[in-house]
Image (spheres, rainbow, N blue to C red):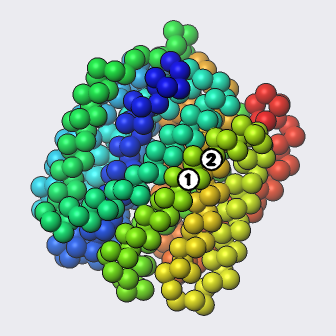
Amino acid sequence: MNYRSSLPLLMLMVVFSPLAIDIFLPALPIMAQDFSVAISKMQWSITVFLLSLGAGQLLAGPLADRYGRRPVAIVGVIIYGVSSLFSSYANSVEFFLFCRLLQGFGACAIVVAAFASVRDRFDPIQSGVMYSYLSSVICCVPAVAPLLGNMLTEQFGWRSNFEVMAAYAACAGIAIIFALPETRPENTFQHKKLISFARFVPILKQPIFIVNAVIIMLTMAIILAYVTASPGWLMLHLGESQQTFVAWFSVNAALNIVAYFYAPKVLLRLGARKTIGLGMTLLLASGLLMFALLGWNHAAAFMLPVMVSSIGISLLMGSCAGQALSPFGDSAGSASALLGFMQMSGAAALVSCVQLLPLTVPEQFILLTVTFVPVFAIWYRLKSTFSCASFS
């Protein structure tokens, strides 16, 4: 499997998750009104999805190691498609959130299969490059999905967004069924028990995994905080129109696309160590900029720091994922699952706690960027203990 032959199909697979997050964001206020709930409760539809997307990987990973990447991906597509269709018919917010929970479980199986397939075939640096390219595709979705979702909502109502997700699952599922090869190595280690914490103990003993997984989790927390809170902050608090929100969201997503496109080039030029350090520095700078602009009650005061953070995030996600999974050639499914669990469920839990604090959305963003201060210090002190082969 080379870059040219594997990328298109893997791109189709990684689109499932961001599509389920971004396409219906412009419709959140309308959905809250339709379900007669506060918009803060509708934001749970994103948090619940990410919680199940992360937690489900602890099962999907071992399944991928035992039965293979291909069957896990196919089952995930089926669950995703059916739950998307049920979401479009939901008449209560409780049933809608339940459908989103199922949708997250389906997406997690597809994500695990895709990431494990990359680790199966590529070395740590190549994997980092592949993850960066896939991340660039993930960031294309926020640039296009809200525009599509805005149009669908205005023309056909918010439920049409979930009908489109079901249709995508059907089309992409056909491609996966006919084109996805099985990449699981023959020497993949398998525990007797399918669900066993013991399978994750050797992974958690690797410092390179812990450090990079924590960085990814905190990075994802910043993304989640932005995605869940920006509709309410920009449209309700600042009074921006739905079209203006989509415009700001799309500009940031376009910046993400460019940043993720160049991230692999930066990784190959600087190496993982310097790339990760630069990414964390930019995230800290975005928090300082947000703090400096707190007195400016304008959408730009919120979005400009977010854009700076987007560049830092683009440098971290692929680099850290490639480094975190590098030692686990014989258990890539379980390692990918644990990384995904920490990234999604850990980030969702962290953001949920932060959003309970009596802080404004910009202040929450600042608090999350501040968490990188101790992580950066630990990373800087520990980096010398890693071999050049694994952390360079």
**Residue 303 placement, left or right of 379:** left
- Amino acid found under the numbered disc labelled 1: Val
| Closer to us: 323 or 204 | 323
Residue occupying the point 60% across, 23% down: 122
**Residue assigned mark 2:** 262
Residue 8: quarter of image: top left
**Residue assigned mark 1:** 258
Q: Cα distance, mark 2 to mark 1?
A: 6 Å
| Closer to us: 275 or 194 | 275
Residue 167: quarter of image: top left
Can residue 1 be seen? yes
Residue occupying the point 58% across, 78% down: 363
How many marks overall?
Answer: 2
Residue occupying the point 35% across, 43% down: 16
Image location of residue 220, percent across then percent down: 54, 54
Image location of residue 355, percent across then percent down: 49, 72
Decide: marks 2, 1 in contact (CB < 8 A)?
A: yes
Mark on residue 136?
none
Residue occupying the point 56% across, 34% down: 130
Q: Secondary structure at mark 2?
A: helix
- Amino acid found under the numbered disc labelled 2: Tyr
Image location of residue 160, percent across then percent down: 17, 57
Residue neighbourhood size for the residue with mark 2, other residues' Cα within 10 Å, grouped as few (<14), some (14–19), many (≥20):
some
Image location of residue 282, percent across then percent down: 70, 62
